[in-house]
Image (cartoon, rainbow, N blue to C red):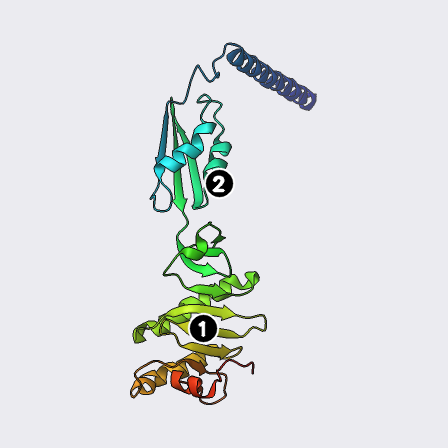
Amino acid sequence: MNRYEESGFRHARGFASGMLAVTVLFLGSIAGIAWVGMGVVAPDRWPIRWLEVNGEFQRISAEQLRAQLSPEMDSSFFTVDMKGLKLAAKRLSWVESVKVQKMWPDTVTVTVEEFQPVAHWNSGELVSNEGNTFQVPEADELQGLPWLHGPDARLEDVLSTWVGINEVLTPLGLEVAELTLDERGSWSLEMNSGTRVYLGRNSTEERLERLLSSWDALMEEQEVPPQGIDLRYTNGFAVAWPQELEEDGRGLGAPL
């Protein structure tokens, strides 16, 4: 008997709570409709008066960003399209990330981060310091960046190899000007000295160390750096000097 009464009480209490929730939702909907009907969220009632743009502007200007966003600003504080603002900003080719915020009662702030290019990637693309590829109209015209080539699926491998090789070249005053991973999985590079180096597919780190340990001795009696170096040998390596290539008309780089 007591158990039944307690159960009935719970049902009654649950029913009352449910009715209260429905009532609150209903009243909230009515209030929302009233706000719209009264024009509370209309663009001319709470207009956006201030647009703040932030970022370290190097490739684009604050004026460019403002002009890009202005068509999205004809709305109220409540109806401004935050997603639309973000998409509009990202249509600028140098913009990598966008953060949009509203500040009561009449301000929108847009903060952008630009791509920071570290290398060219294949033809017409760049790689950012975050490891993302992107395209800009003037990509091939940018100077001072190394050229990296390889299958798109191997971008991460090419980047890590480029960083690793540069670390061992830097003490010699050298750096990678171009690095290529071909379809056969074979590596080759060109240093800023103009020397082309063929590393092959296997044991690339050991082969490069072999060259670097001999670099000072190699350059002792030479006025110019080698034209090409082939490290694809089990022991030792082949070196071609510019004058030798001119005399016999041959070069390094045949597949092994």
How crowded pointer 1 is (Cα within 10 Å; few <14, some 14-19, many 20+) is rated as: many
User: For the point 49% across and 28% down, which residue is it?
Assistant: 81
Q: Position of residue 44 (x, y in %)?
A: 44, 15
Would you place residue 144 above or below residue 80 in this image? below
Which of the 4 image quarters holds residue 140?
bottom left
Q: Is residue 110 visible?
A: no
Instruction: Tell me the residue that label 1 is attached to.
Output: 189
Using the image as rendered, state which of residue 32 and residue 6 is in the foreground.
32
Furthest residue in direction bottom, as rendered:
235
Q: Helix, strand or loop at disc 1?
A: strand
- The amino acid pointed to by label 2 is Arg
Compared across the picture, whether 193 is left or right of 25 comes to left
User: For the point 39% across and 69% down, which residue is it?
Assistant: 176
Q: Position of residue 207 (x, y in %)?
A: 45, 81
Q: Helix, strand or loop at disc 2?
A: loop
User: For the point 50% across and 83% down, which residue is it?
Assistant: 232
Using the image as rendered, state which of residue 151 and residue 68 is in the foreground.
68
Would you place residue 159 above or below residue 39 in this image? below
Would you place residue 164 above or below residue 126 in this image? below
Using the image as rendered, state which of residue 59 and residue 236 is in the foreground.
59
**Residues at badges 1 and 2 in contact (C-beta under 8 Å)?**
no
What is the number of the mark on residue 34?
A: none
- The amino acid pointed to by label 1 is Leu
Which is nearer the N-term, disc 1 or disc 2? 2
What is the number of the mark on residue 91?
A: 2
Which of the 4 image quarters holds residue 21?
top right
